[in-house]
Amino acid sequence: MQSLTVLREALRARRERRRRRERLRRELMEFRTPAERQELDDICGRYDTTVEELLAAREPPAAPPAPPRPAWEEAWDDIVLHFSDEE
């Protein structure tokens, strides 16, 4: 019975992905003018993907992890908190 539940969940997730992809496709087709298309291309460029990849439901590459904060920034936050508590 558990395998039937897993199968149902997989089918449900697949249907949901298909619905989201169709909704995205409709929304993307609303970008019709050259200026709108350029704006869409710029947005995709920020996320290192293309409209075609979005429509094919490919995930953009994962963003690199944020670099650790320099020690001086953490010290600065402590200083600012210290001064703001002395009201």
Image (cartoon, rainbow, N blue to C red):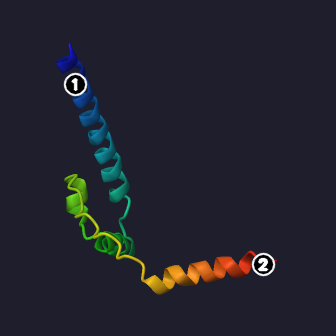
In this view, the residue in front, 79 or 47, is: 79
For label 1, the crowd category at 10 Å Cα-Cα, with few meaning under 14, some 14 to 19 and many 20 or more, is few
Q: Does residue 64 appear left or right of residue 31 in this picture?
A: left
Q: Residue 1 placed where, x, y %?
A: 20, 13
Q: Mark 1 points at which residue?
A: 6
20 or 37: nearer the eye?
20
Position of 20 compared to 57: left or right? right
Q: Name the residue under label 2.
A: 86
In the rendered image, the vertical position of residue 74 relative to residue 58, given as above or below: below
- In the displayed structure, 85 sits above or below 61; it is below
Q: Nearer the viewer, mark 2 or mark 1?
A: 2
Q: Which residue lies furthest to the right in this view?
A: 87
x, y percentage for residue 47? Answer: 30, 69
Image quarter where the C terminus lies is bottom right
Residue 20 in the image: above or below residue 67: above
* Residue sitting farthest toward the top: 1
Q: Say which residue appears at 17% left-offset and 20% top-offset.
A: 3
SS label for mark 2: loop
